[in-house]
Amino acid sequence: MNQLHPREQNTSIRTLFLVSLCVVLMFVDQRFNHLEVVRSNISLVLAPLRYLVSLPVITVDWANEWLSSHTDILNENVVLKADGRILNARLQKMQVLQAENTRLRNMLGSSRKLADQVIVAELLSVDQNPYRQLIEINKGTNDGVALGHAVIDDFGIMGQVIHVNQYTSTTILISDPEHAIPVQFIRSGTRSVAFGNGSVDQLELRYLPATADIEVGDELVTSGLGGRFPADYPVAKVISIAKDLTRGFVTVLAKPLARLDSSREVLVVKPNNGITPE
């Protein structure tokens, strides 16, 4: 015990001395600011140590921020790509709608020039093969459609109604092998009949006189004969002429002006004479 007492006394004295020294240094620093240079130098020496101590925390925060930013960028990229696809689809739809709007305006603009009333209709189904050329439209007797009414698009005659119910109608195209339409050459006035041959790109005019005034490029319109089709509607344009010198006849091939295989909107022509077509 006698050996421990001097040690404890020395420790107390040393502690008291250090506390006194700290008080004196604090007083001197507070009053005279003489230790600012020392404190600055110590801070400068300890700065790398503080940076090394805080480096793991900074690294973790940076990594978290980078991962979060990278994830946000990936998510934003996915969203932007999805939005881009949606906008592209909408743009394509708008282009289709704009084209349809243009076609309808052209059709209605053409109808204003006609003396006949028209009914705007859309195609529901198409039945086209070498033996039958039919289309179904979404207008029927409830809309004023009747048997024999002519059907046109914004380019020319497409066909005529052969079957009708309350809500839909069936139209036979002028290209049907069983269909024939009376026509007239605009340039020469020659009358004939154009027969379908199962091809949407061709009509046949048979047994024309070899002396008939016909040229490639001549345009054909409805003649109005037979009471089926109103007169002066565009039908076709001559694309070839074949002469049979032994028989003295001419066979003419004409291309229909109507888009028989691509039109989606049509007009059903209602004659204003009050007479239902035969």
Image: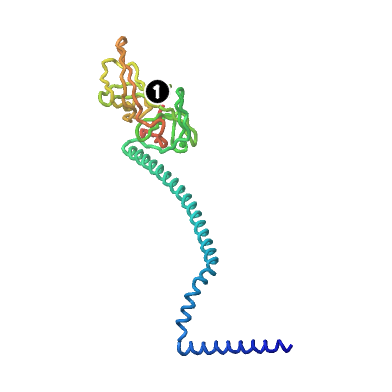
Residue 249 location, x and y as percent? Answer: 31, 14
**In the image shown, does 48 or 167 lie closer to the viewer?**
48
Against 52, residue 1 (above or below) is below
Q: Residue furthest top?
A: 246
Judged left or right of residue 114, residue 69 is: right
Quadrant hosting residue 235:
top left
Quadrant hosting residue 20:
bottom right
Residue 231 location, x and y as percent? Answer: 32, 29
Against 75, residue 174 (above or below) is above
Residue found at x 45% / y 81% = 37
**In the image shown, does 23 or 122 lie closer to the viewer?**
23
Q: Residue furthest right?
A: 1
Q: Residue furthest front?
A: 3
Judged left or right of residue 158, residue 168 is: right
**In the image shown, does 146 or 53 lie closer to the viewer?**
53
Label 1 sits on a secondary structure element that is: strand
- Read off the residue under disc 1: 196
Residue 160 location, x and y as percent? Answer: 41, 29
Q: Is the N terminus in the top left, top right, bottom left or bottom right quadrant?
A: bottom right
Residue found at x 47% / y 35% = 124
Residue 67 location, x and y as percent? Answer: 52, 58
Q: What is the number of callouts on the image?
A: 1
Question: Looking at the image, what colour scheme do you see?
Answer: rainbow
Q: Please tell me how crowded label 1 is: few (under 14), some (14-19), or many (20+) other residues with Cα within 10 Å.
A: many
Q: Is the C terminus in the top left, top right, bottom left or bottom right quadrant?
A: top left
Tell me which amino acid carries mark 1. Answer: Gly
